[in-house]
Amino acid sequence: MKATALAHPNIALIKYWGNRDHDLRIPVNGSFSMNLEGLSAKTKVLFSETLSEDSLILNEEEISGAGLVRVSQILDEVRKSAGILLYAEVVSENNFPTGAGIASSAAAFSALALAASKAAGLELEEPSLSILARHGSGSACRSIPSGFVEWTNGKTDQDSYAFSIAPPEHWDLADCVAVTSSGHKHIGSTQGHRLAETSPLQKARVEDAPRRIDICRKAILDRDFETFAFIVEKDSDLMHAVMMTSNPALFYWNPATLHVMQSVRDWRAEGLPVFYTIDAGPNVHVITLKEKMDEVQAKLAALKGVQKVLTATVGGAARLLEG
Ligand code: PMV
C-alpha cells in the first residue's frame, strides 16, 4: 500500500492570514494563488503491517515532535476514512529551501494528502483532497488544483476548499524568487494566524478582502497586468502591515527584502512589467511575464543581499508519480 505524489508550492496573490477556526484551518478571508512549476515537493507514503509507528523523513532528515504529529493527524484522517489501522512511513523531498516563506508546507501537505489517500486505497475528488490538504496547512489546499487558484473561505469544514479558475497556459507569467535568507523563520504561519486578530488593522484588511478578490480574479481572467500588479502588491503590503502591528509584532523583512521591493518599484516605473509579493518570510516573489523572466532574474541576482534567485512558471495540479 504505497503511493508517491508531487505537488508545487503556490504563491499567494491575495493572502490568507487569520483563521475563523484554527483547528480546522478555516480562514477569515478568501485567497488566490498560482502554482509554481519548477519548484516541487515529492512525497512517498507507505502503509505497512511491519511498522510500529508513523515516521517522517524530510529532505533525508528524520523528523520527530511537532512536525511528525502534524503529519500523523493527516494520516489519522486517511486511516479513518479508509478503515485501516496501519502505520505509515512518509518520505518527502523539496527541491527548494524549507521554512523561509516559499510555502514549503503547502507543497508538502498537498503531496501528502494525495499520496496518503491513494496509498490507503481512497479515490478522493479534488474538493475532498483540497480539504484534507488544508487540515495540514491552510495554503496547501491551493496546491491541489491546477494553475490559477481561488480558495473561498467558506463557513464550514466542507465548504472551504480551493478550485482552479484558469489553467497554467492561460497566462505566461513567471515568479523570480529573490532569496535573501534561506534560514528557518522564527515564527511560523500556524502561530502567525493566531496573532492576526491582535492587530487593529486586521478587521479592515478582512472586510476589504472580497473587493480585492474580485479585482484580482478579473485581472487574471482579462490578463490585465497593470491592475494585477497593483492589487497583488497592495494585498501583500496590507498583510505585512497586519503582521507588523500584531502583538507580539511579526517583522519578516530584512534590509535586502526592502532593497528588492524598492528596486522592483523603480523597474516598474521604467516600464518593466514586474511587481512583488511576500509571504511569511524575508524572500521576495517578483512576478513578471515569462518572456521577461531571464532579464528579471539577472537584475535581481545583481542586487546587494540577494543570495540566489529561484525561478518558476505557472504550475499544474498535484499529481501521482510512479513508484
Ligand atoms: O498555510 P499556512 O498556514 O502556511 O499560511 C500561509 C500564509 C501565507 O503564506 C503568508 C499567505 C498565503 O495565503 O499563503
Image (cartoon, rainbow, N blue to C red):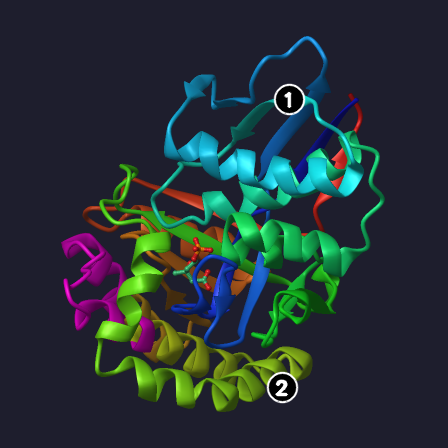
- For the C terminus, give its image quadrant: top right
Q: Quadrant of ligand 1?
A: bottom left
Q: Amino acid at mark 2?
A: Lys
- Mark 2 surroundings within 10 Å by alpha-carbon count, few (fewer than 14), some (14 through 19), many (20 or more): some
Earlier sequence position, callout 2 versus callout 1: 1
Q: Quadrant of residue 17?
A: bottom left
Q: Residue at x 29, y 74 (%)?
A: 197
Query: Under 8 Å from ligand 1: the CB of mark 2?
Result: no
Q: Quadrant of residue 229?
A: bottom left
**Residue 260 among those drawn in magenta:** yes
Tell me: 132 left or right of 279: right
Q: Position of residue 135 (x, y in %)?
A: 56, 52
Tell me: 246 left or right of 275: left
Disc 2/disc 1 C-alpha distance (Å)? 45 Å
| Residues in magenta, as a range | 238-263
Relative depth, front residue between 241 and 176: 241
Residue 7 visible at all: no
Relative depth, front residue between 10 and 159: 159
Residue 140 visible at all: yes
Describe the element under mark 1 as helix, strand or loop.
Answer: strand
List the residue tagged with mark 2.
Answer: 218
Location of residue 18 with respect to 179 vertically, above or below: below
- For the N terminus, give its image quadrant: top right
- Mark 1 surroundings within 10 Å by alpha-carbon count, few (fewer than 14), some (14 through 19), many (20 or more): many
List the residue tagged with mark 1.
Answer: 87
Q: Residue at x 54, y 88 (%)?
A: 215
Q: Position of residue 306 (x, y in %)?
A: 26, 46
Q: Amino acid at mark 1?
A: Tyr
**Residue 28 among those drawn in magenta:** no
Relative depth, front residue between 3 and 97: 3
Q: Residue at x 62, y 71 (%)?
A: 150
